[in-house]
Amino acid sequence: MVYHSYFVAWFAALLSQLKSIGKTYAIIVLDNASYHKGIPDDTPKGIWFKVQLLEACTWYGVEVTAYEYKSQIWQKLQVHIKTHVHPVIVAMTAEQGYTVQYTPTYHSRLQPIELVWAYVKGIVGRAYLVDTTFTDVRLRLNVVFDSLPSDVVYKCIMNSVNEVKRLDTYIKALEAADECDGAIDDSESDQEVSADDCDLSDCGINLDLDA
């Protein structure tokens, strides 16, 4: 994956910069783009031959037998990979004492950099003409980034902070509602009566066996 290779190289430079400025602990927040989650190239794949998958199972300590179908072996390997094989950048980050945190899908507002990027693209996009070239776009991007006002960055960060607070309030409200519903259900259960306690006189039914 080309994008993943480029991103890994860029990410390595980022980790190096964090180390150079003395950051001993940091949480790096990323969205769910596929190239953010690429696993090592030598990770087993479903297109491998059965014998290769068996060798991988031996390497990972996954219990299988040669008598199983390839599909069964691959299914077991997939479970192990999903649980134990981490994305390349997650492993890189852990080695440096940092942490990667992925934001929920479809929540770009939780990423200040996405808001900054939208701001920059808006300015560059409004300067587009029919004769604009890729070189022009690149130069304009550099100019806008170099002149990015600090208050814009601050507002983008605060927008994300406020979105986190809003989601936190919303989730807590849902949890409170669930707890309330549970309490009502328990109360209704406590008030249930047995058939022996039911009064059927209003229904015109006489259960007096001596009558």
Image (cartoon, rainbow, N blue to C red):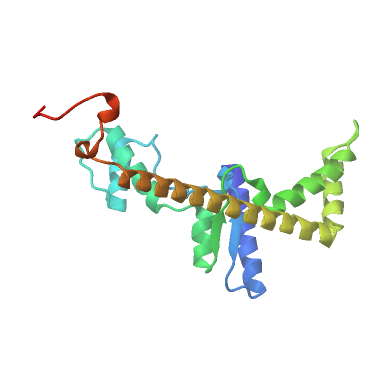
- Whether residue 34 appears in this view of the structure is yes
Q: In the rendered view, does 173 fall on the left or right side of 80?
A: right
Q: For the N terminus, give its image quadrant.
A: top right
Residue at x-position 66% and y-position 67%: 17
Q: For the C terminus, give its image quadrant.
A: top left
Number of numbered discs visible in the structure rendering: 0
Q: Residue furthest top?
A: 204
Residue 146, x across and y down, in percent? 84, 58
Residue at x-position 54% and y-position 66%: 98
As displayed, is residue 36 above or below residue 153? above
Q: In the rendered view, does 169 fall on the left or right side of 181?
A: right
Give the image quarter of residue 185. Answer: top left
Residue at x-position 28% and y-position 38%: 73
Give the image quarter of residue 76. Answer: top left
Q: 201 or 136: nearer the eye?
A: 201
Residue 71, x across and y down, in percent? 31, 33
As displayed, is residue 50 above or below residue 164? above
Residue 107, x across and y down, in percent? 62, 46
